[in-house]
Amino acid sequence: MELHTGLSFSVLCIQILVGLSKATILFIVASGLTLILGVLRIPNLAHGSLYMIGAFTTYSIATVFSQSSLGFWMALLLAPLLVALIGLIMEQGLFRFLYKRDHLMMLLFTFSFTLVFGDLVKLVWGSDYRSLAVPEIFQGSLSLLGMPFPRYNLFLLLLGPVFAAGLWFLTNRTLLGKVSRAAAVDREMVGAVGINVNRIYAAVFVLGCYLAGIGGALVAPTQNISQGMDHSIIIEIFLIVIIGGLGNVWGALLGAVIFGLTDAIGILVAPQFGIIFPYLAVITVLIFRPKGLLKSIW
Amino acid sequence: MKSSLKLFCLAALIGCSLLTASNAFAAETIKVGIVDTYSGPASTYTNDVRDAFALEVNKINAAGGIFGQQVEFVTRDSKFKVDLGMSAAKELVMREEVDILMGTINSALALAISDFAKQEKLPFLATFAKSAKITGEKGHRYVFSMNENTTMIGKAAATGLAKLPYTTYWIAGDDYEYGHAVADGVWENLKKLKPEVRLLGQSWWKVGEPDFTPYITAMLAEEPDAVIIATGGRDCVPFLKAAQTTGFNKLVPFYMHTATEISTLKPLGLTAPEGVIGTANYHSYYPDTAENRAFVAEFEKAYDRTPAVGALYGYITAQFISKAYAKAGEVDTEKFIDALEGLSVDSPVGTVTMRAEDHQIMLPMFMGVTTKVEGQQVLVASDIVTISAEDAMPSLEEIRKARQL
């Protein structure tokens, strides 16, 4: 195995920034998953499928506007709303009746949604890959410390802290956030105090799906929008949620950062085996902190 | 005998004779069974094979067919799955009673069908699958390859790259058999032709990698003279997209098989990166011979799109089938195979020959550089260098060693 240790500082910096920009999307999607897991106790395997639907919908909406910049912003606005709507239908139509059930049962239900959504996407969009152009203002790269840094990655990098701050504000400063945190800890007490727990659950589920939709919309210009997207992301975000601490949004942020950074640095240091580094990091974390790095709701 | 029994016997006799009659009708056509992936992204490539094949078969039939028999073909969609493809192949042989099997873009399926054809003693003409094993270590009497394989890609690319002034290289690609086979093929041959080349390192990403940026950054940090990109059909377009975004193509010259092919360049349109070195087996505009122009015109008229490399494979397959039967003198499998060995046909890329020893077709390779052309919506290859089939073929020594003969 060849290790490339004679690295210049600038290359390392750029690679770290690239890793963090990848982490943004992982964080956004994982935070949705962890919210649903923490408050509703549902391990939502269909989260990856919702992310994929978000990406395909973004492609379709943007194409209506002939993939112009306007198209992308419209899609960024509307696609997550559609995914949130799908989430609402899922929650009101099915999950609402199943909260008392076994966790394994919930896992199976969400898994079945994965299969259904997978085929639904194939039915609506066909099995070809789609490609979305990066909006004009983000096309090309900046020269940062002598290396190219794609503008869109910079956009994602800046978006990360915005989302982190927004979610912090939501969970700590809004009524919904505070009640959700309470409901995550003790559902019955929240109900006893007179709050409509069902509404809270629905709101949190919809929010989680909305986040999955935004993640899908943001990732759409960067890669081939294709059928396997749901499978590859769900593994990554589940691992992130587990190492971060179940139900913990900050844990999702930490997990996503670890994942993105180990991936980027690994590629730099041992490019032949670049793929394995994030998973090695996950194994390491789980050996030392099996309950996750930060406090877990469970 | 009771009258009802008599009636039954009569009905049974008529039924049986009808059955044999229909079998007799079936024997009046030469049937080709094509198993390939016609759904999903791979279909962009395989549709061309089938469509060009259909065009040629129609011409052959219009001219009277082969020994007065019409050539008929049926297709089955394997959806890129080996088990589906194998059931389809079996059904084609058992029920449809095809004379020849043809297909597929999936190398694993091609190898499985090849094995099946060997057992059934039926000729299998492989189209699009690029594994060198098909005519190499797993080659046998009943399988023929109608396109280039990873060894040929490697040799041809190395021949072209050896002429360029680059000495330090980086290799990167899809972490699966095809990627490694292409990379190894190019590198082993490049080292032989130009011993002073050095490999600085390698990067391998998963097939379907969503973000190439960290890999591109890492490669740029190493500052190689040139990079060999070994991506399979699925990742060629996304990688070129990433190269354009990061300006990779302007910072480091890189080589990718099929980078100059229309199937790769069309989806990118004018945002395709310029200056990428690529190899391809077919261009609709090169060589600019009467044969090629006629082929392109006919295809465009029938299907309203420019033919890509798959069309070349479909065309020559039909030509080989027709000429081999004609040379054999009758519709007999063994004679067909004997006739096909060493046979040459005319094609849009010149005369191509089926090498007798390993049943591998000898195709020339064209290496060029992606360039924008005034007035065109798709980039084309310029400064095209032709690498002859002889230079690209694996040596008979290598084949013998692979088959352990």
Image (tube, coloured by chain):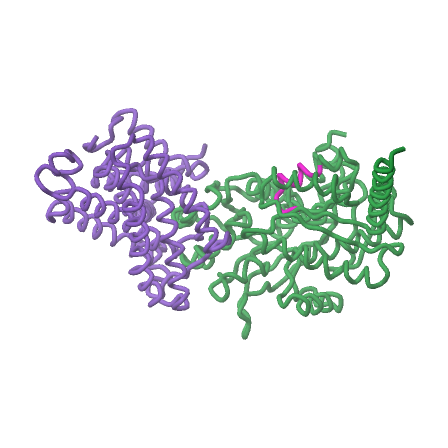
- Above-or-below relation of A162 to B150: below
Q: Is residue A114 visible?
A: yes
| Outermost front residue | B2
Residue at the spot 38% in from the left edge and 61% down from the top edge: A134
Q: Main secondary structure of the magenta part?
A: helix
Residue B385 image-quadrant placement: bottom right
| Outermost left residue | A193
User: Percent position (x, y) of residue A126?
Assistant: 49, 54
Q: Residue B109: within the magenta?
A: yes
Question: Position of B281 compared to B359: left or right?
Answer: left
Viewport quadrant of the C terminus of chain A: top left
| Outermost top residue | A287
User: Percent position (x, y) of residue A12?
Assistant: 32, 44
- Above-or-below relation of A121 to A62: above
Q: Residue B387: within the magenta?
A: no
**Along the line of sight, which residue is nearer the eye, A210 or A130?**
A210
Q: Which chain is purple?
A: A
Question: Position of A217 compared to B49: left or right?
Answer: left
Q: Is residue B195 visible?
A: no
**Along the line of sight, which residue is nearer the eye, A131 or B204?**
A131
Viewport quadrant of the N terminus of chain A: top left
Residue A244 image-quadrant placement: top left
- Above-or-below relation of B292 to B404: below
Question: Position of B28 compared to A196: left or right?
Answer: right
Q: Count numbered badges in the picture.
A: 0
Residue at the spot 24% in from the left edge and 49% down from the top edge: A207
User: Percent position (x, y) of residue B339?
Assistant: 86, 46
**Along the line of sight, which residue is nearer the eye, B173 or B29?**
B29
Residue at the spot 48% in from the left edge and 54% down from the top edge: A129
Q: Which residues are magenta?
A: B104-114
| Outermost bottom residue | B375
Q: Which chain is green?
A: B
